[in-house]
Amino acid sequence: MAQHIVVKEYDANYPLMFEKEKKLIIPILKENLVEIFHIGSTAVPGLKSKPIIDIMISVNSLEEVDKKQREFENIGYEYLGEFGIKGRRYLRKGGNERTHQIHIFHKDDQENLVRHLAVRDYLIIHEDIANEYGELKGKLALRYPYDIDGYCDGKEEFVRQLERDALKWYTVKNMR
């Protein structure tokens, strides 16, 4: 059965769910771990979202991460390798009713690391844009309840513009 796309109101437990998962991940990565971040819509207070905790991790070595596949599987993750983004390791938990996703990048992959952080921080500061994004996601989830491609295609233009705006904002903010 295909993933059921449901967009819900923000849940104040999302940060706690991230922290709980973080405690499971740190012992697996040990000294390879550089930083671990809560990203995505569940990291933005008040933003409607699919109830999936997105976790981004920077590491010293992706090859060392690959050696930990079984340990991630032991805590419930599917290990999917790059999964469409060169230089990323992607893991997901929960099957079709996904609960968590992990995106792992090398610490020098600033393009991907900064992109995710910029969008998260931009949405936290710009509530109007976050609300617009949440409304769009809600409408798309109703229109495409079992069609992840239709859902993603429907928000693609908005997300591309959001990323451009967020990166400009983030760059200026961090130049100060």
Image (cartoon, rainbow, N blue to C red):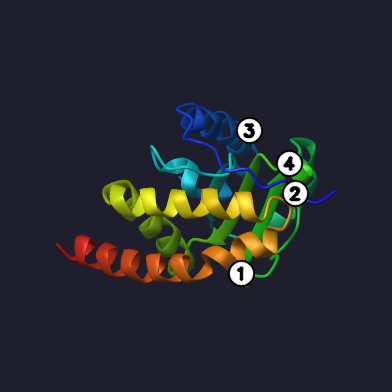
Q: Which residue is mark 4?
A: 97
Which residue occupies 69% across, 51% down?
91
Which residue occupies 39% across, 37% down?
46
Which numbered dot is residue 87? 1
Q: Which residue is mark 2?
A: 3
Nearer to us in this view, 10 or 104: 10
Q: Which residue is mark 3?
A: 24
Give the mark toward the camera: 4 or 1.
4
Image check: 12 left or right of 144? left
Name the secondary structure under disc 1.
loop
Question: What's the distance in space between the residues labelled 3 and 4, CA to CA?
Answer: 20 Å
**Label located before the other in sequence (2 or 3):** 2
**Label located before the other in sequence (4 or 1):** 1
Which residue occupies 26% across, 64% down?
169
Q: Give yes or no for contact between labels 2 and 4 (Cβ–Cβ under 8 Å).
A: yes
Q: Give yes or no for contact between labels 2 and 3 (Cβ–Cβ under 8 Å).
A: no
Nearer to us in this view, 135 or 66: 135
Question: What's the distance in space between the residues labelled 1 and 2, CA to CA?
Answer: 26 Å
* Amino acid at pointer 2: Gln
* Amino acid at pointer 1: Gly
Q: Residue furthest left?
A: 176
Image check: 160 left or right of 154? left
Which residue occupies 36% across, 59% down?
118
* Amino acid at pointer 3: Leu
